[in-house]
Image (cartoon, rainbow, N blue to C red):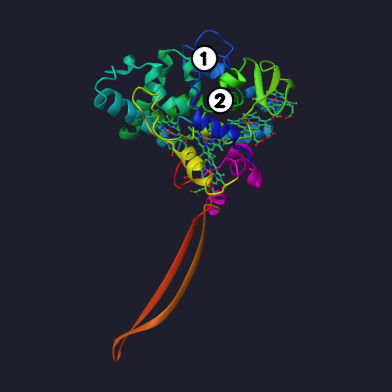
Amino acid sequence: MKIAKTVVSALMAVSAAALPAAAQDTEKAKTLDELATMFDVSSCKDCHTKIHEEWAKSYHATSLVGSPRTLATIATTVQDGMMKEWGKSGVKNVKDITVEHMMSCAKCHLPQLKYATDEVAQEIAQAALDFLAAGKAGDDTKKQAAIAKVSQVGINCIVCHNLKAITHKWVDGEVEPNVIYGSTDGPHEDKKFTSMKKSPIMTESIICGQCHGLGPNFDLPEPTQCATLYGSYLHSYIPSGGSQTCQECHMHQDNVGHFMPGYRSASSASRAVEMTVDAHGYYFLPKAGDSIPTAVVKVDITGKAGHRIPDG
Ligand code: HEC
Ligand code: HEC
Ligand code: HEC
Ligand code: HEC
Ligand code: HEC
């Protein structure tokens, strides 16, 4: 079991002054289409076909849409949070929205947004608001159009195999442009990502922990709290003797690979808890002739996931 990096990270939260390395392009994306092109992974499909198929079905692929509860919640964050309750956010209408505002969610749901201009943040906010309004008006065409717009971007190969591939930058350095991070160093056949380097964290839980949350995000001007699962993994599962990584349970088990299923998958859900039920019946006789059938049921439930459930 490898927890070295995990432990170090808990002790020293070194913040990352990341460079626009994954993007290569020095210019920021000015539209959502441009951001999608900057992080395009269609070429990966030719050679890593199975992985691409697994990923395309995952929640990571459409990380702004979700079930589609995510898109609806982004809309209410803008409408009820930024425009109403958060009086000092500076947002009165969509045109006031900046990348920093959208980072409240994009920090984990779309980290590449930092390579885009405020106009892209506004496009995403507008699509989320359109989605909510279309839902209320029962306009399915508009709803689908909003989903299609934000589905162009998501947590894809480049996000994990470049952007998020190094956590401890004062030890391991910044991620480099045109490099795909995996298990080894060497040349790589892709036209844009022409070399491979070893990521110090790719097989460790911390790569997932970057987004699967510790608790409130105090680094944000208006701290939000969404996923907190990495906190329970670190503070509950590991101290009680747990030794598996996220990858072992969510990628290697059942060979599910990049689909990385959660509770919506029947096989994952079936491993969530171990339950033993012990029952026996007897008659309770409060007074002669008045016997009441009674049962004693003892249920033991043990969590088998590597973290609190439900969590995220
Ligand atoms: C022309 C074929 C080709 C294309 C296109 C391609 N790859 Fe690869 N990739 C390879 C080969 C061959 C290897 C070496 C070993 C292997 O098969 O895993 C490799 C290795 C990798 C590894 C490292 C695997 C390890 O050992 O940990 C990652 C990660 C990866 N590619 C991701 C990508 C991504 C992301 C893209 C798209 C941006 C991409 N590849 C495009 C052929 C390709
Ligand atoms: C860049 C941030 C990021 C990284 C890195 C990341 N995730 Fe996620 N993950 C997310 C987000 C955001 C979602 C939810 C998307 C949605 O539904 O809105 C998600 C969804 C999931 C789900 C599905 C949960 C469900 O509701 O069914 C699982 C399981 C999961 N991730 C596991 C992992 C594992 C394992 C790793 C590491 C190998 C990992 N993730 C790395 C951000 C990330
Ligand atoms: C949420 C993060 C995440 C995303 C998105 C992601 N990967 Fe990976 N990938 C990983 C992790 C973690 C491993 C290492 C798993 C292990 O060895 O335990 C890995 C392993 C690999 C490997 C080497 C091992 C293998 O399974 O063959 C290749 C090649 C690869 N990924 C390619 C891709 C491609 C191509 C995409 C996009 C279609 C992609 N990955 C998207 C996290 C991710
Ligand atoms: C010992 C195996 C195991 C380990 C280790 C593990 N998980 Fe899970 N995880 C599960 C199981 C089983 C479920 C399904 C629980 C359910 O049905 O509610 C699950 C569910 C999830 C979900 C969906 C949320 C939920 O409440 O069901 C996410 C997201 C997730 N895991 C991410 C991670 C990440 C990230 C890590 C590492 C920090 C990790 N898991 C470590 C077994 C594991
Ligand atoms: C610390 C990283 C992080 C931040 C910040 C974050 N999220 Fe999440 N969010 C996640 C991860 C990881 C998941 C996947 C866990 C799961 O689905 O169980 C998730 C899941 C969700 C889900 C449930 C997915 C579904 O469709 O069922 C919603 C809704 C959501 N996020 C909305 C938001 C909104 C809105 C914001 C901004 C106000 C936000 N999140 C900020 C990491 C984050």
Question: Residue 137's x, y, as percent?
Answer: 31, 33
Rendered view: 18 above or below 60: above
* Amino acid, disc 2: Thr
The quadrant of the rendered image in which ligand 3 is seen is top right
Name the side, left or right, on which 11 lies relative to 70: right
310 and 33: which one is in front?
310
What label sits on residue 57 in the rendered view?
Answer: none
Q: Quadrant of residue 223?
A: top left
Question: Residue 208's x, y, as percent?
Answer: 54, 34
104 and 236: which one is in front?
236
- Would residue 26 be seen by someone viewing this image from the given angle? yes
Tally of marks: 2
- Would residue 210 be seen by someone viewing this image from the given angle? no
What label sits on residue 167 in the rendered view?
Answer: 2
| Part of the protein shown in magenta | 244-270
Rendered view: 94 above or below 108: above
Residue that label 1 marks = 34
Query: Is the N terminus in the top left, top right, bottom left or bottom right quadrant?
Result: top right
* Amino acid, disc 1: Glu
Which residue is painted at 57% across and 51% down in the image? 267
Residue 255 lies in the magenta stretch = yes
Question: Residue 213's x, y, as percent?
Answer: 46, 34
Instruction: Tell me the element at label 2.
Output: loop
Which residue is painted at 67% across and 18% down in the image? 193
Question: Residue 255's x, y, as percent?
Answer: 66, 44
Q: Quadrant of residue 126?
A: top left
Rendered view: 218 above or below 229: above
Q: Estimate how packed mark 1 is, as few (under 14), some (14 to 19) or many (20 or more) residues with alpha carbons within 10 Å.
A: some
Name the side, left or right, on which 126 lies relative to 279: left
The alpha-carbon separation of the residues under discs 2 and 1 comes to 27 Å
